[in-house]
Amino acid sequence: MPITPRFTAAAILEDLANTSDEDVRVACDTALKDAYWKRRNLHHVLAIGYSSIGRLLAVAKSASTPEGEHDALSGVKATLYNIASFTWPGWDEQGIDVSPTEAAAGLDAAKGNLAYAEFLDKGDLAISRAHWMVGAHELTAGMYDDAAISFASAAEAAQRAGSEPDAALSTSFGLLSKVASGDATAEGPLAESLDHLRTLADGEMFADQVITARRVIGC
């Protein structure tokens, strides 16, 4: 009799439940990424993601050392970041159709990721990217003023971290938020910001992210 591949969410969650505490963080991360990149299934992403968070919180609670607790909570943060990223419509990822409910779950996850980045003292670069993810969801949700504030916080943290590409990316997205809100005076600064972004490491890729997000939100 042929073996049925264990691709259903229930089967994957059963496997995770039987994974040892020592291996659970890697197992959760792999299962979540497979649900997105291989299965292209946001229902599985959310089911696996939040079940993983519950398991990792239990591991953190029962950890025998501060290092073990910190590692498990870092896994919670990483899972929240991935949920937020995978449910952001602004990537315009082929084969992924993000529903309003899934996007709302992504915004909640982005805020959770930011809270954990601060609680775990992950440093300015992680905090910058966490603010960026919150802003990204706010942007595609039409919360343009909130997005501009989040992107400004992301740019400031990136500057403290010494990452000019991250700062420039966040600045460009902040200007896009203003354009999306109807501020025509931000068009020129946005074009200049994108020109500057393209001169930096990974700048072409980052500029493409801004352009793709603008196409998605239709402004």
Image (cartoon, rainbow, N blue to C red):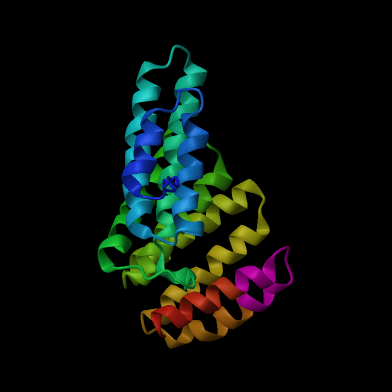
**Residue 64, visible in the rendered structure:** yes
Q: Quarter holding the N terminus?
A: top left
Q: Nearer the viewer, residue 194 or 68?
A: 68
Measured as percent of width and height from the top left, residue 64 is found at: 44, 11
**Residue 130, visible in the rendered structure:** no
Judged left or right of residue 45, residue 165 is right
Residue at (59%, 82%) from the top-left corner? Answer: 191
> Quadrant of residue 105 in the image?
bottom left
Question: Does the magenta run of residues contain 206?
Answer: yes
Measured as percent of width and height from the top left, residue 106 is found at: 35, 56
122 w.r.t. 152: above or below: above
Question: Does the magenta run of residues contain 119?
Answer: no
Which SS type dominates the magenta stretch?
Answer: helix
55 w.r.t. 136: above or below: above
Extreme residue toward the left, this view: 101
Q: Which region is colored magenta? A: 194-207
Q: Nearer the viewer, residue 159 or 26?
A: 26
Q: Nearer the viewer, residue 162 or 105?
A: 105
Q: How many marks?
A: 0
Q: Quarter holding the C terminus?
A: bottom left
Residue at (43%, 64%) from the top-left corner? Answer: 136
Measured as percent of width and height from the top left, residue 204 is found at: 68, 72
Extreme residue toward the top, this view: 64
Extreme residue toward the front, this view: 1
Extreme residue toward the bottom, this view: 184
